[in-house]
Amino acid sequence: MASNKKLLVLPGDGIGPEVVGETLRIVDWMAKKRSVSFDIEEGLVGGAAYDAHGTALTDETMTDATHADAVLFGAVGGPKYDDLPFELKPERGLLRLRKEMDLFANLRPAMVFPSMVENSSLKPELVSGLDIMILRELTGGVYFCEPRGIEDLPDGSKRGFDTQAYTTPEIERIGRVAFDLARKRRGKVTSVEKANVMMSGVLWRQVMTALHASEGEGLEYENMFADNCAMQLVRTPKQFDVIVTDNLFGDILSDCAAMLTGSLGMLPSASLGAEDPTTGKRHALYEPVHGSAPDIAGKGMANPIAEMLSFAMLLRYSFDMGEDADLLEKAIDNVLAGGMRTADIMATGKAKVSTATMTDSILKELDKLV
Ligand SMILES: NC(=O)c1ccc[n+]([C@@H]2O[C@H](COP(=O)([O-])OP(=O)(O)OC[C@H]3O[C@@H](n4cnc5c(N)ncnc54)[C@H](O)[C@@H]3O)[C@@H](O)[C@H]2O)c1
Ligand SMILES: CC(C)[C@H](C(=O)O)[C@@H](O)C(=O)O
Ligand SMILES: [Mg+2]
């Protein structure tokens, strides 16, 4: 029977196809055991699309993405493509998807599973129970602003330049998402910029502070400089609830938060567009925070959990299937508690397993839980 849930799967490059392949085994399990079926289409993105079509994302795949209810994405990039011109690089495919689907709100939760406390780079007491949400603005800032380029100077040297800019509506719409998220969590928002050196940061602080005064009733609110935030994240990370920040600072701070949870291989993300007021639907793409990990690609070593947790976010945010998302998260939690570890989250006394064996264990655990 055809499902009304259209999923576009874009595995990409490096470990992308490996972790997506494992996650599709979970999707199959959901179809068989929970009667949750999806209409799945697969496409090429990144280096894989470049190899086949000479571009990191074809117009057809772009259209498929806008027509899908959700996109499940792996990772793109790799050394093979290092010498390509900027506009042809694998990463352009991902950036085009984000921009053209208007996925302005990127939710990057950093949670520490109880049995993973020892894997964090910080002391156990600093990360035990950690649950923070980094909300990254994803369609503006230096990633997309013009002008940018590399120009020749009269003295024969070159000048590379980018532009960082934010408008009031761009800041307000991400700010509203931050306040909504905080209301469902512990009620605190930290807005992060560098208003001490950047004009876009000055506006960001003004707009966010005003928005808090007009729409943030009952919420605790603070402004913080990005460098201080990076330091506070490794000093006392549990002081944070929701961190809202721009595209570039969000990229950096979320990698930093990843290590608090034990590995980049553990961090999922959801990139969401605005809700259509008539249909109630929104564009959405789900991807791990990590990249294509060329150093371990093809070795069966990748941790599939970030991709699987991204699928759990897909169930929760695109299909209102919170119970199924909880079930998958519980299975992962139990398997980790049982001592299963891929190489990146290895610790003394635990069982080091391959990507596929980690999935086998999660599937077995799912069977036990239902
Ligand atoms: N969303 C994306 O597609 C995305 C995100 C980040 C980087 N990239 C691209 O990936 C390529 C490599 O970038 P990088 O090396 O800076 O970052 P990376 O995230 O690919 O890897 C950083 C380190 O983390 C490890 N790692 C990452 N994911 C892992 C997992 N699931 N399991 C175990 N270990 C894991 C890698 O082995 C590596 O040592 C570049 O081309 C970059 O542009 C893509
Ligand atoms: C691959 C790259 C374009 C991407 C980014 O910089 O946004 C990645 O680092 C991420 O965190 O999703
Ligand atoms: Mg990044």
Image (spheres, rainbow, N blue to C red):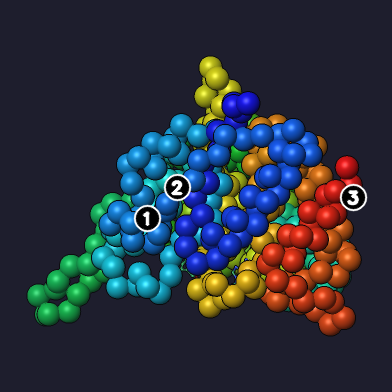
- Quadrant of the frame with the N terminus: top right
Question: What residue sits 53% from the left and 51% below the top?
Answer: 73
Question: What residue sits 40% from the left and 74% below the top?
Answer: 79
Q: Are marks 1 and 2 in contact (CB under 8 Å)?
A: yes
Relative placement, left or right, of 182 versus 150 is right
- Quadrant of the frame with the C terminus: top right
Res. 30 image quadrant: top right
Res. 7 image quadrant: top right
Q: Residue 311: x and y, percent?
A: 65, 47
Q: Amino acid at mark 2?
A: Gly
Mark 1 or mark 3, which is nearer the start of the sequence? 1
Mark 2 or mark 1, which is nearer the start of the sequence? 2
Q: Amino acid at mark 1?
A: Ala
* Residue position for label 1: 49
Q: Residue 87: x and y, percent?
A: 28, 58
Could you say which is closer to the camera, residue 300 or residue 93?
A: 300
Q: Amino acid at mark 3?
A: Lys
Q: Dot 1 lies on which element?
A: helix
Instruction: Give the total of numbered labels.
Output: 3
Relative placement, left or right, of 315 versus 272 is right
- The tag on residue 368 is 3
- The tag on residue 43 is 2
Q: Residue 221: x and y, percent?
A: 68, 46
Q: Are marks 3 and 1 in contact (CB under 8 Å)?
A: no
As drawn, the residue found furthest toward the bottom would be 348
Give me the C-alpha separation between circle 1 and circle 2.
8 Å
Q: Residue 227: x and y, percent?
A: 57, 67
Could you say which is closer to the camera, residue 352 or residue 309?
A: 352
Q: Dot 3 lies on which element?
A: helix
Could you say which is closer to the camera, residue 115 or residue 134?
A: 115
